[in-house]
């Protein structure tokens, strides 16, 4: 099974994803690691990505997901997956894939991003991500303002019951 933990920057995708993978003894992967250097450079300069920038990244992710499915791997993937079209590109096996949406307030997101060090995604790009975000209707929706252990437990409960 592949579980995509999604949301805008600052929602806790990587932290929650790593903890979830560890609790399930699954592999963890971060979609940020699949970005071409040109995308990272743009974001570092505070320039929002456009769909054309994201396409090579999405194709790399799609190839990795296809490989994991073929190998029957259990993977938690932290990935922004902001638009419905992106999620449709990535989630082509509804039986073996689940999406978890970490939802939280603008204030909490901005606070988290301001406290980040050594990360290319800066707080000023948050508005562009929120403008791009199309909230999923077919996902496990989790309040990301809760304590991490509560979030992980809720996701595990949904995965085991669904």
Image (cartoon, rainbow, N blue to C red):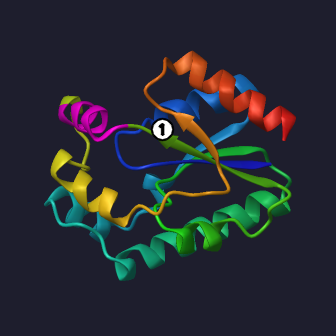
Viewer-side residue, 76 vs 154: 154
Q: Percent position (x, y) of residue 80? A: 46, 55
At which x and y percent is residue 37? 31, 65
Q: Residue drawn at (23%, 56%), measured in percent from left and top?
A: 127
**Against 117, is 76 above or below?**
below
For mark 1, give the secondary structure: helix
Q: Is residue 134 left or right of residue 120?
A: right
What's the residue at 20%, 28% (across, down)?
115
Does 87 appear in magenta?
no
Q: Is residue 102 visible?
A: yes
On screen, residue 70 above or below 25: below
**91 relative position to 33: left or right:** right
**Residue under the image location 32 percent in, 58 percent down:** 129
Q: Is residue 25 visible?
A: no
**Quadrant in which the C terminus is drawn:** top right
Q: Which residues are magenta?
A: 105-114
Residue 101 place in picture, x, y as percent: 55, 46
Counting every numbered tag in the picture gives: 1
Asked whether residue 107 is drawn in magenta, I would say: yes
Question: What predominant SS class does the magenta segment belong to?
Answer: helix
- Nearer to me, 105 or 31: 105
Residue appearing at x 68%, y 56% in the figure: 138
Callout 1: few (<14), some (14-19), or many (20+) C-alpha neighbours within 10 Å?
many
Q: Quadrant of residue 20?
A: top right
Left or right: 32 with respect to 117?
A: right
Q: Which residue is mark 1?
A: 14
């Amino acid at each position: 099974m592949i579980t995509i933990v999604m949301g805008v920057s600052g929602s806790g995708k990587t932290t929650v994803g790593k903890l979830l993978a560890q609790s399930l003894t699954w592999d963890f992967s971060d979609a940020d690691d699949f970005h071409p250097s040109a995308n990272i450079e743009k974001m570092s300069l505070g320039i929002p990505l456009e769909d054309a920038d994201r396409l090579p990244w999405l194709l790399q992710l799609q190839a990795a997901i296809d490989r994991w499915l073929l190998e029957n791997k259990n993977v938690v993937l932290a990935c922004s997956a902001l638009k419905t079209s992106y999620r449709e590109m990535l989630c082509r096996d509804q039986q073996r894939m689940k999406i978890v949406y970490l939802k939280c307030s603008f204030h909490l997101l901005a606070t988290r991003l301001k406290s980040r060090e050594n990360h290319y995604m800066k707080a000023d790009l948050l508005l562009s991500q929120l403008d791009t975000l199309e909230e999923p209707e077919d996902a496990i929706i989790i309040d990301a303002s809760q304590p991490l252990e509560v979030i992980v437990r809720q996701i595990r409960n949904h995965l085991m019951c669904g």
